Image (cartoon, rainbow, N blue to C red):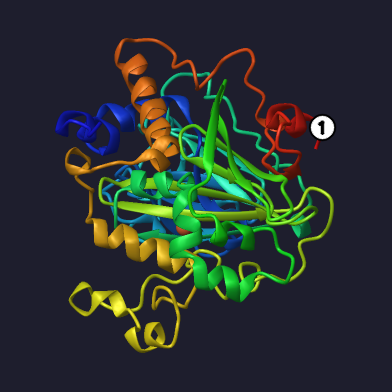
Amino acid sequence: MAMTREDNELLTRVENGAPMGEMIRQHYWLPAIPASKLEAGGRPYRVRLLGTNLVAFRNTAGVVGVMDELCPHRKASLALGRNADEGLRCIYHGWKLDVHGSVVEAPNHVGDQAQFCKHVRVNRYGVREAGGIVWVWLGKGETPARFPDLPFIDLPDDQRSVTSVEVPTNWVQGVEASMDSSHVGVLHESTTQMTAGGGNQRLLMTKALAPRLEFEDRPYGYRYAALRPTPEGQLYARINNFVMPWYGIICPPHPGGPSTVFFSTPVDDVTHRAWFVHFNTSSRLGMTIMSASPDVWNFPPLPPGPAADNWGQNRDLMRRGHSTGFPQHLGTEDFAMFLSQGPIVDRSDEQLCSADGAVLRVRAALLRTVREYQAGKTPTLADSPDLDYRAIRSVGIVMPPDADWRQMAEAA
Ligand code: FES
Ligand SMILES: [Fe+2]
């Protein structure tokens, strides 16, 4: 059933007091910047989240701070500030802020500086460095949202890679794609062939385009199994998890391989940041396309051309057999689809099919959560006693055709 325009607005908009943006501020931590971008005493970075401009820096003692981008004095950008002596100093009149955003020096004020600084109003945000990412909580009150300590958070750095890139479309298009199993064998047919070794079970996916999907609600969202028959008469079950509000945790391509977490975080209504975390809970990740990327804050590449040039699609390559003409990266293929859908896709005019159950459940979970928030409740999926982020597992299993994937998943 197509969505109403009103629901589509409620689902997608996050700026200027939109309910979804306010709900996320209050009840979820936002990934802000890869921790490796911030060097002690190094340059600050501008970070935009939910339409709010922030600045992130690591002070000379190694502690990370995230605060409003504009100086509380006369609103010059602190992204231009000098990072020294455990603080960020505005280059306009020299006010100095600590990692909590508090003004600690106002050298152009004549009089009792300490007293003056105490009364400068600032917004304070929760900041946490974990899992190779700097996170921020933008909510109100003393008790921050529950932290999403997902399975990649506590791993050593060499078992995880974190990259991300800003994409000029609404965030929900990205979140939907992370759970949209049936596009993988089509859109990524060539990139999968190029990166998958022989025996890679993902190759099976290109041979059976319409998996049977089975769903199970979980305290954090839901999980599903995409079930495909194997040539040997077994069933290949790929069990993936959707974790509110934007995490798609995808099972490894083969046993012992790396899992992937995709997340699409809202920069503003028409921009999102696409994050790719690869992790292996049992061994080092080694060198991958992601970990070798020259800039973890700007990878994978966006489509190379403008809309008028079909975003740089390479038709010659397609004639030679490439399925999309976007050979740069699997992510580039996804981004081309998002861009072609437009800044905010019109979900009132879609014609969905049986493969779209996972996408519909993403929308339903987000809408249910924002409606609970509007009704003044703590959203069920944001904080329940059974919610255990650490226990979430996405696995691929080859099993007998009559076995129950839920039991097999517990044993895997
Ligand atoms: S604007 Fe920053 S110190 Fe004046
Ligand atoms: Fe994709």
In percent of width and height, residue 298 lies at 47, 67
Q: Residue at x 39, y 39 (%)?
A: 354
Q: Which residue is mark 1?
A: 411
Using residue 261 as the reference point, say whether residue 318 is left or right of it.
left
Q: Is mark 1 within 8 Å of ligand 2?
A: no
Which quadrant holds residue 103?
Answer: top left
In percent of width and height, residue 222 lies at 54, 28
Q: Residue at x 28, y 38 (%)?
A: 12
Using residue 384 as the reference point, say whether residue 407 is left or right of it.
right
Q: Residue at x 57, y 64 (%)?
A: 42
Using residue 5 as the reference point, say whether residue 41 is left or right of it.
right
Which quadrant holds residue 37?
Answer: bottom right
Where 350 falls versus 376 (above or below)? below
What is the tally of numbered marks visible in this picture? 1
Q: Secondary structure at mark 1?
A: helix
In percent of width and height, residue 274 lies at 45, 55
> What is the three-letter code of the residue carrying label 1?
Ala
